[in-house]
Each structure stands twice: as C-alpha cells, then as structure tokens.
Image (cartoon, rainbow, N blue to C red):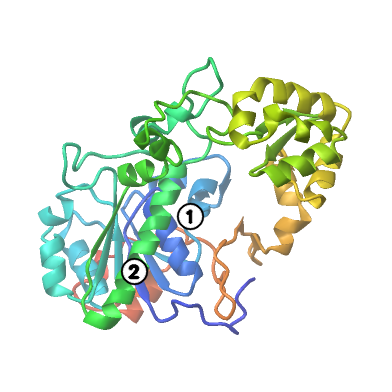
Amino acid sequence: MTDKGAVAGALDGLTVIDASRVLGGPYCGQILADHGARVIKIEPPQGDETRHWGPPFHGDAASYFIGLNRNKQGIALDFSTQEGRDVLAALLERADVFIENFKTGTLEKWGLGRAELQRRFPALVHCRVSGFGEDGPYGGRPGYDAAIQAQVGLMSVNGEPGGKPTRMGIPVVDMVTGLNAAVGVLLALQERTKSGQGQFVEAALYDCGVSLLHPHLPNYYLGGGLPKLAGNAHPNITPYDTYACKDGDLFLAVGNNGQFAKLCQSLGIPEAAADPRYATNALRKEHRPELRALLEGALSAWAVNEVAERLVTSGVPCAPVRTIDQVVDDPHTHARGMIVDLPDGYRGTASPIKLERTPATYRRSPPSFAGDTDAVAQDFGLADGDLAGAFIRKP
C-alpha cells in the first residue's frame, strides 16, 4: 500500500540515523523506515557509492541505490571535519537508533567510539554492520558479499555436478545481514523498554554467512561428510530438484511419502509409488538416477505451466522455473502488494513483512543527494548557528 496518512507504522515515533553505505546497513534502515521510523540517511561528500552502480539510472541514482533507500530523508556530512562530527552528535542526541558500517577504529578516531557513544547517549541503540566483527583473527577486515560467500563455504555448495563452485546470483549474505541487523535493533529496542538502556548491536557478514549453511552444517556435524556440488538437487530430499518438461523446467519439492504418491498418481505412473525402490525418502535418494529418468519420461508429455498447475492443485509442491519479468507480471505478485508504485515514477519491491493493523507504508522515494538538508537542519535546530555550514549542499 502507499501511505495516505491513515496508518501510523509500528515504528512511528522512532528516529534512526543511518550513516551506512552500500547494502546491509541501508537495507536495515529501509526495513525500519518502511514500518514507520523516521530514517535520516547521511552520505559522505562523494555520496553512497551505490548511487553510481549502474546503469540503469533514475536522476542522480542508480537502481542499486534506489532499491535500498526509500522512505528516508537524505543529508550529507564530511565526518573528517569536526563540524561534521558535531552535527552527527547533535542528531544522535535525539535519535533512538544509529546504523553505521565504518571500519573498525574509525569512530574511535573521531572521538565517537562505542564507549563514548554509550556515555553520551545511554539510551541509543548503536547498530554496526561489519564484515567480520571487531574481534577474532579476521576482526576489523572489510567484507564483501561474494568474498564472504566464498570464505564461509556457500559457494562450495552451489554449482553443477562436475563444475566449479558458483556465487549465488543475489547478494544473499548482504541481504540477510541487513535483515539480522534490523532484528537485532528491534530486540534491543524491546529490551530498552525494561532497562531504559540502549546497547551495541553487531551484524557481521561472516557470521550471517555461516548461519545460512543449513542443512549442510547439521549434516556435517552428524558425520555426513563434505557436501558435493549437486546443481538444484537437495542434499537430503528426493525428488527435490529441477526436471525437464516438454517446453521448460519444473522444480519439484516433494517432502514426504504422501506427496510422492500424489505426484505419481497425477503423472499417470501410480505404480512408481508402490515400487519398493521409492518407498521412503532415503530409498528415493539412493535410487535418484532411476527416479529422475522415470519422472522426466512422464513429464516430457506435459507443458511446464500446465503440469505445474495440475500438480499444485493435487497437493504436490512444485513450480515452473521463471524469469524476472514473469514474476513482475504475475497477478499474485500484485495481489500480495509486492510492487510499489509512487506518483513520482518510483517503482520498488515492497516489504514482505505483513502486519495487520500497522502495515508497511511507502511515503517517499529514495532521497536525492543531500535533498532534505534544509528540513533536517530546521527540525534539529541546526539551520542557524555555528553548525549550519557543516551540511553539504547539492552541487
């Protein structure tokens, strides 16, 4: 939905200072902003680098920036100057949450390290998105999504048999880190209602990447050995893979014996459900090649969309393998409110978090560079006086 002033979000009244850049931190800030928080994004003099990660572009921003920064007000400060740091401190004085992803030691160098922030702003929730955290052998190192995918083993479980490990086609570690950062912020805010105290929240890409290794880590813990590249096949379940139909690929996600029996019945091969080789998931996994040949033989007579509809309505989880444009055009995508269109031409992907009484709202497009300087300066009492000149204006 778009905001017409009728609904206050669940986080209405919360003020967030988002001094993060690129993906994880900005995504965390957008989650909070979608649900009603006032989020003020602070960019460096050169801007968030994702403004330039295009084409495509809209105005002064690339699509990459646009996808992560809606519902925010935008200002720019130079933290290498004392005046810039003083403005930040003035903003934090009235803030509930501070999101940043500066390199370890940077805030300390500026006189705004963790201990100092806790001393000056005891109720502030300070959220840091980092690559590896600040301790441990890799503490303080910068982290990037694809490099983390490689380092934590995600690439080692992604790729075709006989091929090489492959990066996942989305920045999954960055996105999950942003989501975990938002969860951490909300947990800290909930605890603050009892203690009155803020706290430091850290979401590290390395930690979040490791946390995604399910079921591969549990398998390994129980002596299952190292996983092998298996394409789209599931390491524990069969049939749970992509299968060829007459005109495209179908993903079957059959998780139990009842679903397997329905699959066989719907495809006209009921005898397969009674075959002792396929009586249990463990046996189906053991006889995976024979089962694949049997299923693809039956599926070869079907158009993928037709058989997908037949199977789903029969109680068999599955889906055609589709392209991005097909997803955007799907009526269900729109029925679920997953496409956001604003009057100024902004189009974005909606929040998947659905609250009944206080849903997400979409109040403003991503800010132009330093586009809200006057409004923020005025609201925080900084429009006049010694710090007024610290704000960087639009070129």
Q: Nearer the viewer, residue 248 or 334?
A: 248
Which residue is labeled 1 in the image?
68
Residue 203 vs 264, above or below: the answer is below
Front tag of 2 and 1: 2
Q: Position of residue 334 (x, y in %)?
A: 72, 60
Q: Nearer the viewer, residue 43 or 238?
A: 238
- State left or right for residue 76 relative to residue 31: left
Instruction: Give the residue drawn at x 40%, y 34%.
Output: 149
Q: Nearer the viewer, residue 236 or 391?
A: 236
Q: Position of residue 349 (x, y in %)?
A: 60, 56
- State left or right for residue 55 relative to residue 213: right
Which residue is labeled 2 in the image?
187
Q: Quadrant of residue 191?
A: bottom left
Instruction: Give the residue drawn at x 72%, y 40%.
Output: 260
Around disc 1, counting alpha carbons within 10 Å, would you say few (fewer than 14), some (14 to 19), or many (20 or more)?
many
Q: Gap between marks 2 and 1, in whole Å?
A: 22 Å
| Residue 75 shows in the view | no
Residue furthest to the top in view is 162
